Amino acid sequence: MNFCSHCGERVSLRVPEGDNRPRHVCESCGRIHYQNPRIIAGCLPVYGDQVLLCRRAIEPRYGYWTLPAGFMENGESTEQAALRETLEEAQARVQLKQLYTLTSIIHVNQVQLIYLAELERPEFGISNETLESRLFSEDEIPWDQLAFTTIRNALRFYFADRRENHFPLRHIEMEPGTDSLPLKP
Amino acid sequence: MNFCSHCGERVSLRVPEGDNRPRHVCESCGRIHYQNPRIIAGCLPVYGDQVLLCRRAIEPRYGYWTLPAGFMENGESTEQAALRETLEEAQARVQLKQLYTLTSIIHVNQVQLIYLAELERPEFGISNETLESRLFSEDEIPWDQLAFTTIRNALRFYFADRRENHFPLRHIEMEPGTDSLPLKP
Ligand SMILES: [Zn+2]
Ligand SMILES: [Zn+2]
């Protein structure tokens, strides 16, 4: 950030009075421009013993498989965001069942929320972000072709939890250097 | 938003190619400036049969009681944000037990996460955001002096769930005009 989005003057990076960390401050109009993490909302659509994955038509990770998920927009709830992304990316209508994973992806300033969902009918499709959508049973999951660690985590948890028929909220912190995102090809 | 924070030129509000909603677009450098909901993280600190509340030293709702909570910062997890806010606002150290409420406050583009937490010792204090911190038993809660609907919800759920000793994640959507935030005095 170089310029004030309100008045167009240059901003400086300094700790404002009463604050304890550097912010982009406009000395001209006085505005402080905070930067905060963004939310990614999506779901894990289940149909019988299969799950729905989408093959990415965009970078990063073009051609790799993922769950329908994307940035939450202003003016919607987390659930509405998850439903919208599922419809946009997979052309699929689902019923959300519960929040399943909450992952703080610290090094990219994102918080990812994945809901467990039921696919109502085996109807799904493609979009400008999705080359292909497909149902996979557990033994068909393309583990080495998944786009992101968070997606791999959600799928691993799901198949393990399904054996117990118990799906606790999975609360995950991803730090830089641990199991970084995206996965290496 | 009037100006591009990157190059300082005027932005226009239009639907970018491949998108489906208006964004602030810089025609000069090509950047698209997305605006997304922000996360508020905090906790409900429990000490025996009491809970810790803070009386606000800042607007909005100066003088009203709240739970320690504030905007999540870049570079931290949701839990770290909740712990930091509790330390900053109430000078209190807690152990987070579980995520308890997730509230989409749609009309202000916020998602609030409140964790159930255990206050380790009955030690707490004031800050530049807090006039006073105090432990309250259930029959002492100042229900008509609470700062926000989300705080009232969290406390109501907590005391009800405590009778059952079962604390499911409470997933709440707040729409404009329903039970708006902040409460009327
Ligand atoms: Zn300015
Ligand atoms: Zn620009």
Image: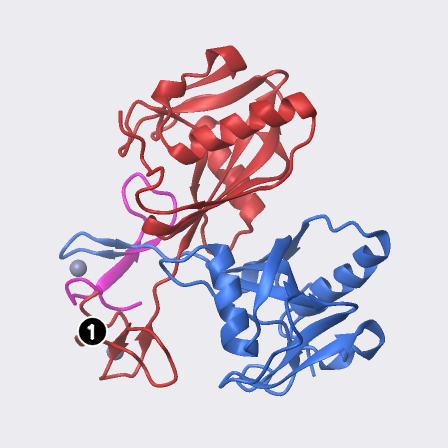
Chain colours: A red, B blue
Asked whether residue B140 is drawn in magenta, I would say: no
> Seen in the image, is B2 located left or right of residue A89?
left
In this orientation, which residue lies closer to the viewer: A165 or A136? A165
Disc 1 residue type? Gly
Q: Secondary structure at mark 1?
A: loop
Quarter of the figure that contains the N terminus of chain A: bottom left
Percent position (x, y) of residue B71? 47, 66
Q: Is residue A132 visible?
A: no
**Dividing the picture into quarters, in which one does residue A179 lie?**
top left
Q: Is residue A95 above or below residue B142?
A: above
In this orientation, which residue lies closer to the viewer: A55 or A83? A55
Percent position (x, y) of residue A105? 40, 47
Q: Is residue B29 above or below residue A90?
A: below
In this orientation, which residue lies closer to the viewer: B106 or B136? B136
- Magenta region: which residues? B1-24
Q: Is mark 1 within 8 Å of ligand 1?
A: yes
Asked whether residue B15 is drawn in magenta, I would say: yes
* Ligand 1 quadrant in view: bottom left
Percent position (x, y) of residue A184? 27, 29
Q: Is residue A41 visible?
A: yes
Quarter of the figure that contains the C terminus of chain A: top left
Q: Residue at x 35, y 30 (%)?
A: A129
> Seen in the image, is B16 located left or right of residue A65?
left
Residue lying farthest to the front in this orientation: B121
Residue beneath disc 1: A8
Q: Which secondary structure is most common in the magenta stretch?
A: loop
Q: Residue at x 48, y 67 (%)?
A: B84
Q: Is residue A171 above or below residue A119?
A: below
